[in-house]
Amino acid sequence: MKIRLFSIPNIITLLNLICGTLAIIAMISEPSVNALPIAFGLMISAAVFDFLDGFAARLLKCPSPLGVQLDSLADMVTFGVLPSIIALKIFYLTGGEGLWGSLTLLIAPFSALRLAKFNIDDSQHEDFEGLPTPANALLIGSFGYFVCRYTGDFPVWMPTAVIVCAVVLALLLISPVRMFSLKFRNFGFRGNETRYLFLALAVVFLIVFHFSGICLIITLYILTSVIKWLACPKKRRL
């Protein structure tokens, strides 16, 4: 079987990888807070490419096992390694000291576990088990964007809060919590109530808070999914 490396979907996936790599370079080479909005902008671009590669594969009817693996490898860089570096930088920029900040790096290995599990789990077509890596990365990236724009003094508890949030998010990546997806089987309101309500609120948050609203949107996504999962025990898997 001939393996085609440079199909249109694969090229789009590689653009995701390039954006993630450039963002990591920006985080390492620029020690100041100015690296955070650059990394966040590149992360958003990567997320768009991450959506478009699957869309292009379905549109052109050329899905491939290579594309699936390539997508996970690109996501590991952009939505696994990059957010762990951003979280570490946020820890130090908000006044953190010492090696406690290294706990934020748990995001990278837990993202790897999340992506590997997704590739072999056939139960995640309509919803997800655990927090999706792009959502986790965008939450951390958007908080970094907020930190960059914040002009006041950070409270003394902020570094501790960063570590706690990083650990909680890492655990959510591999948790059994079912997270709803935005994949529509049909566009009727019945059966899609949560999706339509979430999208409507997301638009409002973006209009009111601009890019900083992404942090609120994903926080809402996590809380809604957790509450829905706890309220529907039949949907929990042992």
Image (spheres, grey):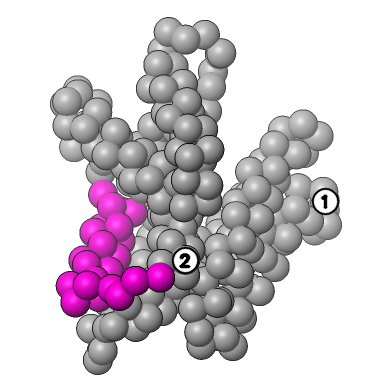
Quadrant location of the C terminus in the rendered image: top left
In screen coordinates, is 204 left or right of 223? right
| Type of the residue with mark 2 | Arg
Residue 75 on the magenta segment: no
* Range covered by the magenta-colored residues: 151-175
Residue at point 28% right, 52% down?
A: 172
Which residue is identified by label 2? 149
Residue 41: percent from left, percent from top: 61, 61
Residue 164 on the magenta segment: yes
Which residue is identified by label 1? 7
Q: Which residue is outermost to the bottom?
A: 98
16 to 192, vertically: above or below:
below
**Residue 147 visible in rendering:** no
Residue 73: percent from left, percent from top: 58, 63
Classify mark 2: helix, strand or loop: helix
56 to 89, vertically: above or below:
above
Residue 35: percent from left, percent from top: 55, 76
Q: Earlier in the sequence, mark 2 or mark 1?
A: 1
In screen coordinates, is 95 left or right of 140? left
- Find residue 176 and report its image quarter: top left
